[in-house]
Amino acid sequence: MRVVIAEDLALLRDGLTRLLEAYEFEVVAAVDDAVKLGEALRTYEPDIAVVDVRMPPTFTDEGLRAAIAAREDRPGLPVLVLSQYVEQLYARELLGSGDGSVGYLLKDRVADVSTFVEAVRTVAAGGTVLDPEVVSTLIARAPTDSPVSRLTDREREVLGLMAEGRSNAAIAAALFVTEKAISKHTSNIFMKLDLDPDDDSNNRRVMAVIAYLQS
Amino acid sequence: MSTTVNLAPPAEGESFVEGVRRRVALTGLSVVYVLLAVPALALLCVLTTSLGVAVVGVGLALLLVFVPLNQQLANLHRVLSGRILGSEIESPYLSPMGGTPWKVIRGWAKDPARWRDFVWTYVSVTVGWALAWLALGLGLAVLWYAVFPFVFAVTPDGVFDMDYGVLTLDTQAEAFLEWIWLAVSFGLWWWLVPLIMKWRAELDRAVLSPSREVLERRVAEVSQSRAESIDHSAAELRRIERDLHDGAQARLVALGMSLGLAEELLAKDPAAAATLLAEARSVTTSALGDLRSVVRGIHPPVLADRGLAGAIQALALDMSLPVAVTIVLPGRPPAPVESAAYFATSELLANIGKHAGAARASIDVSHDGRALRIVVEDDGVGGASVDRGTGLAGVARRLAAFDGTMDVVSPVGGPTVVTLEVPCALSSPKISPSSGTA
C-alpha cells in the first residue's frame, strides 16, 4: 500500500516512515509542508495520505485545510489526519469533506502501533476512524431527547468503539465478550437508531452513526 | 489655514518668514473662532432652554439632539486649541451608556464632562469670543494701514484725510506717512497675536480637558486592574508550574524508571520486560494528555489556529447542550483581547454546564466599531451573581485589565444573560460572518 506522509517535525516524520515501512507500507513521499503535500499527492497518487494538522508556514491548521482541499480535488482520497490535540470542529469539517475514507487521531495513538496500523488500513479501505476523545464527547453531548438516549450503557460503549472504526471482532476483544454478543448489540443499536440493520458495510454504519450523532 | 504651518510656538527659533506665516495662520484661525461662536451661542440658548424644560418630554428630546452636537463643537475646539498649544486636549467623556434614551440622558447627567461642555458654551461666546476678536482686530489693523495709501489714492479727496493736530495728512505723499502706524500695528500684531491665541486656547483647555477627578479616578482604576492582573498571572504561572510538576514531569520520571528496569530485565526475563514496556507506553500517553490540558490552559491551540470565531465555535461544540452561535466580526481583535474573551466565554459556558440546568444556550459575538461584545444567554435557573460565585468575579477581573466590562442579568428562575464588552479595534477588514447551532 502506497503512503504519503506530511509532518514537519523530522523526528516524527522519520518515526512514522519507519513504523509504516515495518508494516509493509510503501512510503512514496514524506514531506514537511502543505504545499509539498499537494504536489506529492498529484505526483504519486497514493492509496492514503497521513497528514499532520499543524505545519509551516503559519503553524496553524494548514494540514487540515490541505487534506480537505485534496479530497475536493480527488473525491474519496483516503486521508488520516494526526494532531497533538483534537477538536470536534475539525472532526466535523473532515467528515463533511466526503463519504468515508477519513481518519482523525491524536498523535498519541501512534504509540499503540497495532491499533494505529489497523486505523491506517481501515481508512485506506474506505472506513472512518475517529479518535476516542472525539467520540466520547460526541456521545456525551447527544441531547437527552435524542434516540441515542434510548441506548443502554453497554450499547453506547459499543457505538463508541464502532465510531472509532473497529470491527465487531475488535470490539468483542476490547470488551472481553464474544463476537456474537457484539453483533446482537449492533443490531439493537441499528434498530434503536432507526438504521437499516441489513447494511453491513463498515464504512456506512460508522458514517450513519456519526451523522446521526451530529444531527 | 494650511496644515503644514506649525501653530504652536517652535522650540527653537523660527525665521522671519516662518514667524509671519504662523501669525497669519493664527489670525486666520481667530476668524474661525469668531465664526464658531455663532453655533456656540445657538447651542447655549437651546441647551439652557432644554434644561429648563427638561421635566417635560420635549426638553429631553432636544437634549438628545443637541448634547451630541455640543460635543462635536467642543471636540472641534479641542482639536484647534490643541494645535495652538502643541499638545493634544483629550476627550474626557465617560463611556457612553447604551440602552433607552432615558438611560443615555441619565448617563450624560452623571458625566462632569458634559456639564463642562455646557459651561464652555458660555465661556466661548463671551471671553473666548472677545479674545478671538482682539486677535482678528490686530490683523485687520495691519491690513488697513498697509493698504491705506492706496485706498487714499482711489478715494475722492478729503474722505480719508487724517488730522493729527500738528500735522494733517491730505496729500498722497503724506498718506504714506500712515505706514508709521503700519509698523506699530505690525509690532503689536507680531507680539500679541500668538499670546492672545494662546490665552484663548488655554481657556478652552482649562474648561474642556479632563478634570482632575476624572484622571485620578482613572489612575486608581488602572492601578487596581494592573495589580489584579499581575496577581492573576502570578497565580496562573503557579498553577502551570504545579500542573507540569505533578503531571507530565512526574510521568516522565516514572517512564524513565520503567524503561531502565525493562533494559535490565530484557536479557533475564523478556516477558516482564515486555510488560514494563507496555506500561511505559501507557505512561507516555498520560503524560501527553497532561501536557495537552496544560497547553489548553495557556493558549488553546484552536484559538491560535482559527482565532476567536473558530475557538468559540469549538467551545460551543464541546458543550453537552445545544448552543446557537452567531459571530459577526469584520476582523480579528488583538491577540490578548482574543485570549481574554475566549477564557471569559469558556468560564461562562462552564458555569452554564455546572449550575444553570439549562436546556439550551446561545452566544452572540459582534463588534460595534468601538468594542467587542459577547452576549452569552441560557434558559436555566438564573440567580447567578458576581458576588456569589468566584467564577464570574474572575471573569470580570480578567476583562478589567482591558477596560472591559461584564453585565449580568439573572433573575431567579432565569433566563441568564451575561454581556461582555471589551473596547478594542479590529485588525484586517476581512468579513467573516458565521453562524450555526451546535
Image (cartoon, coloured by chain):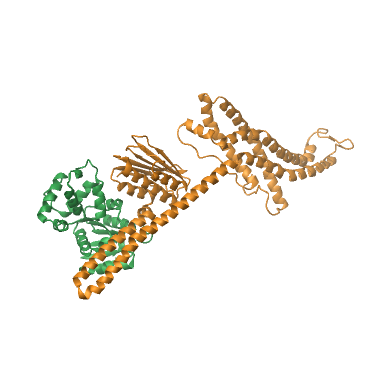
Q: Position of residue A215 (x, y in %)?
A: 24, 44
The residue closer to the viewer here, A153 or B246, is B246
Task: State which chain is coloured orange.
Answer: B
The residue closer to the viewer here, A65 or B425, is B425
Q: Position of residue B224 (x, y in %)?
A: 50, 47
Q: Quadrant of the N terminus of chain B?
A: top right
How many numbered marks does the figure carry? 0
Q: Is residue A211 visible?
A: yes
**Which of the 4 quarters of the picture holds residue A128?**
bottom left
Residue at the extreme bottom: B267
**Which of the 4 quarters of the picture holds residue B329?**
top left
Q: Quadrant of the C terminus of chain B?
A: top left
Q: Position of residue B94 (x, y in %)?
A: 53, 39
Task: State which chain is coloured green.
Answer: A
Q: Position of residue A203 (x, y in %)?
A: 18, 54
The residue closer to the viewer here, A67 or B122, is B122
* Rendered view: B157 above or below B311: above
The residue closer to the viewer here, B155 or B4, is B4
Residue at the extreme left: A180
